[in-house]
Amino acid sequence: MKDVMEIRVDKTTNSKIAEVDFDNLPFGKIFSDHMFVMDYANGEWKDLRITPYQNIEISPANSTLHYGQTIFEGLKAYKAENGEILVFRPGANLDRLNKSAQRMCMPEIPKELFIEALKKLIDIDRAWVPGKEGQTLYIRPFMFATDEFIGIRPSDTYRFIIFTCPVANYYNKPVRVKIEEHYSRAGQGGLGFAKTAANYAASLYPAKQAQKQGYDQLIWTNSGSHEFIEESGTMNVMFRINDTLITPASNDSILRSITRMSVVEIAKHWGYKVEERKVSVDEVIAAIKDGSLKEAFGLGTAATVAHIESLSYRDEDFDLPPIEQREFSNKVADYLNAYKRGLEEDVFAWNIRV
Ligand code: PLP
Ligand code: COI
């Protein structure tokens, strides 16, 4: 392992940080000065390096461009009051990246290597971690095939990169969602649980149609019968019906959200009743109609805890209870935000310090 861990560093002499307006950060358009890169060939990861953030050159015959053999992750780093930087559950992201890798016939990444690379990159660009409320450093690790070959088979070679962006919140207001019954994001036995480009590609057209109708996001249902709620475009979903928190259990067509896993653990720790199971559309609509649905929200790294303001089903728009009355989601959003910034005790051992 010791040779593999050696990371070469080539620092930029031309930092862009002075050009960034940290009071007006967009999501995902500004990139920090450096990136981590490594290549896979002959069964091993090699040439570990931190370089200036820059374009990459690939062949027109690069197999990723044609067949989509690529996976990614999204996680965040937060600035604590004492100036330390805290990364939230990077090990969980690596576990999911490796599950995606397996499904996509790609090589896994050893945990020690990933955490070392991440810490070193964040440390070099620590000035890029914004500190204002609602701001974080979004971290995007990704891997793609690099074979120059247009036959259909898994690539023999890969590149893995981590770059980072200072960001503000992805949603700055509660979201309006529509339950989708025609299109599917992922099917049984497909790629839904993997964080791979194909799932996002499949979602673009239906999401665009919904946006044209005035909705922010879709809620996907199971392909085929469309009876059960799966997840939303960039987040898993949770409902509070009376005093019980209900969330669709992970399956092979849902991305297993680390934010949702965390909220489930917190809720149980606080003594809430949590059910991870199949959630039918009928159950949710009935709970809206009889007033037992108290809260509905999305959970994701970029989205954080996103209140669902209204839900549309079969051309009927249902307004959900006022945001200020949503006791659980408001409380857990505040707690999680404080936790990630080191303002709460790290009782679950989720924060990694840089
Ligand atoms: N579902 C999808 C499709 C996503 O893109 C994301 C974002 O990563 C999530 C759920 C939420 O997962 P996490 O909380 O791990 O970010
Ligand atoms: C996430 O990391 O939360 C995503 O899925 C990415 C996207 C919303 C930018």
Image (cartoon, grey):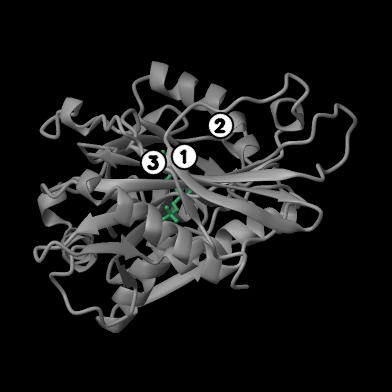
In the rendered structure, find residue 203 and report the number of the disc placed on it: 2
Please state which of the two labelled residues, at mark 2 or mark 3, is closer to the viewer: 3
Disc nearer the start of the sequence (2/1):
2
The quarter in which the N terminus is drawn is bottom right
In the rendered structure, find residue 9 and report the number of the disc placed on it: none
Q: Are marks 1 and 3 in contact (CB under 8 Å)?
A: no
Name the residue rendered at 46%, 39% in the picture: 233
Please state which of the two labelled residues, at mark 1 or mark 3, is closer to the viewer: 3
Whether residue 76 is visible: no
The type of residue carrying mark 2 is Ser
Circle 1 residues within 10 Å: few <14, some 14–19, many ≥20:
some
Looking at the image, residue 165 lies above or below residue 95: above
Q: Are marks 2 and 1 in contact (CB under 8 Å)?
A: yes
The type of residue carrying mark 3 is His
The type of residue carrying mark 1 is Gly
Name the residue rendered at 82%, 45% in the picture: 156
In the rendered structure, find residue 233 and report the number of the disc placed on it: 1
Check mark 2 vs ligand 1: CB closer than 8 Å? yes or no. yes
Element on which disc 3 rests: strand
Question: Gap between marks 2 and 1, in whole Å?
Answer: 7 Å
Check mark 1 vs ligand 1: CB closer than 8 Å? yes or no. yes
Residue annotated with mark 3? 34
Residue 215 place in picture, x, y as percent? 36, 27
Looking at the image, residue 332 lies above or below residue 101: below
Whether residue 74 is visible: yes
Question: Gap between marks 2 and 3, in whole Å?
Answer: 31 Å
Residue 103 place in picture, x, y as percent? 73, 54
Count of all numbered marks drawn on residues in the image: 3
